[in-house]
Amino acid sequence: MLKKSLLMFLLALTSAVCLAQETAMDVLLMPDIGGIKQAIEIKTDDASKPVLLFLSGGPGSSMMNNAARYTTVLKTRFTIVQWDQRDAGKTLKLNPSPNPPTLAQMTDDTRQVVEFVRKTLRQEKIYLLGSSWGNVLGFDMVKNHPDWLHAYFAVNPVVSQMDSENELLQTLKAQLKDNADASDELAKVNPPFNTAQDMFYLRKWLFYKEGKTFVFDPEFKAFFGEWSKTWSSVWTDVMRIDLRKSLATVQCPVYFFVGKNDIQTSTGVAIEYFEKLHAPRKQLFLFENSGHQIHQEEAEKFQQMIIGILDANSARQP
C-alpha cells in the first residue's frame, strides 16, 4: 500500500512538472509580419496568465533589453510580451525594412502582431500597453479592434504631438533664455518641423535640460540624422494626429499613466483628452515623480497600478 501511494505521489509530481514545463515560456519568436521577420519575446511561468503586450516608444526604439527593470512584479501576474518594431532592436538586426516605414505600415504591423500573439497564446483578449509613440499604434488598435482587448494602458501618450512640441518649444525657450546657444538654435525651430534640423535642435536642448551631455557629441548629431532619414515622414504624419478630435469615444477600458513633469508629451494635453474621452471605464494615474519615462522613473508604482487594475477587472468578471 505504501509503495502504491509513493508511486501515485511520484506520478502526480511528474505530471505537475511536465505541465509547468509545457506552459512556461521564455522564447524569442520571429514570425513574418508585414513581409519581414519581426522579433517577439514571450516570457511567462504560466502561459494561461493574462497577456500584457508592450508597444515601445520611439519610433525606432526597443524596450526589450531593459524589460527586467519594469516587469519584475508584472511577470508574477502576466505573460509578458515584448515586440521590437520594424527597423528597431532585434527586428532591425534580423532584417531592415526594404522600404522606409510608413505610419499605415506600422499600424498594420501592430494589428498582425496582436493577432499573432492572441493565436500563439490562445487568448481571445489581451492587455495592451503603449509607451509614448507606442500610443499612436495602441490607440489605432483601441479604435479598430477593441474586442481584442481587455483594456488599454496609455503611458505618456501621444495625443496631439503638434500641441506638445509647441508647448515644449516655449518651455525650453523660457528655461534656457540665459543660454545664448540654446536661444539661437531654438529660435530656428518651427513645428511641424520643415527640416530635420528643426527637430534635432528641439530634442538636443530637451535632452540637455534632462542632464544628457552627449547631445554635444558629433555622434549624436550623426545618429539623429540617420534616424530622420528613416522616420521623419512617419513623424510628419504623427504631427497631424489629434485624438481629441479623431477619437472621442472608445469601446474598451482605457487607463492613462501620466508623468506630472512630462514636457515631451504634454501632461496637460493628456489630461484634457482623458477628461473628454468616453469609454466603458477610464482612469488616470498621475505619477508625481516622473517625466516621460514612468516605467523607469517609478517602476514599482507603475507595476503595482497595473496589477491593481488587473485585480479590479478580475473581480468584475462573473
Image (tube, helix red, strand yellow):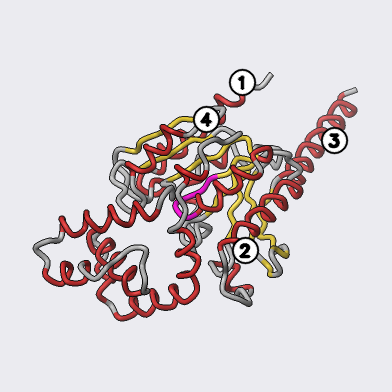
How much space separates mark 2 and mark 4, taking CA atoms? 31 Å
- Residue 40 x %, y %: 64, 58
- Residue carrying label 3: 11
* Residue type, label 2: Gln
Main SS, magenta region, reads strand
How much space separates mark 1 and mark 2, taking CA atoms? 36 Å
- Residue 253 x %, y %: 56, 32
Which is nearer the N-term, disc 2 or disc 4? 2
- Residue carrying label 2: 105
Q: Does the rendering let one see residue 206? A: yes
Q: Which residues are magenta?
A: 129-133
How much space separates mark 3 and mark 1, taking CA atoms? 37 Å
Q: Nearer the viewer, mark 3 or mark 1?
A: 1
Residue sitting at x 36%, y 43%: 269
Q: Nearer the viewer, mark 3 or mark 2?
A: 2
Q: Nearer the viewer, mark 2 or mark 4?
A: 2
- Residue carrying label 4: 309
Q: Nearer the viewer, mark 1 or mark 2?
A: 2
Residue sitting at x 38%, y 50%: 293
Q: Is residue 113 left or right of residue 223?
A: right
* Magenta span includes 184: no
* Circle 2 SS class: helix
Which is nearer the N-term, disc 3 or disc 4? 3
* Magenta span includes 132: yes
- Residue carrying label 1: 316
Q: Quadrant of residue 284?
A: top left
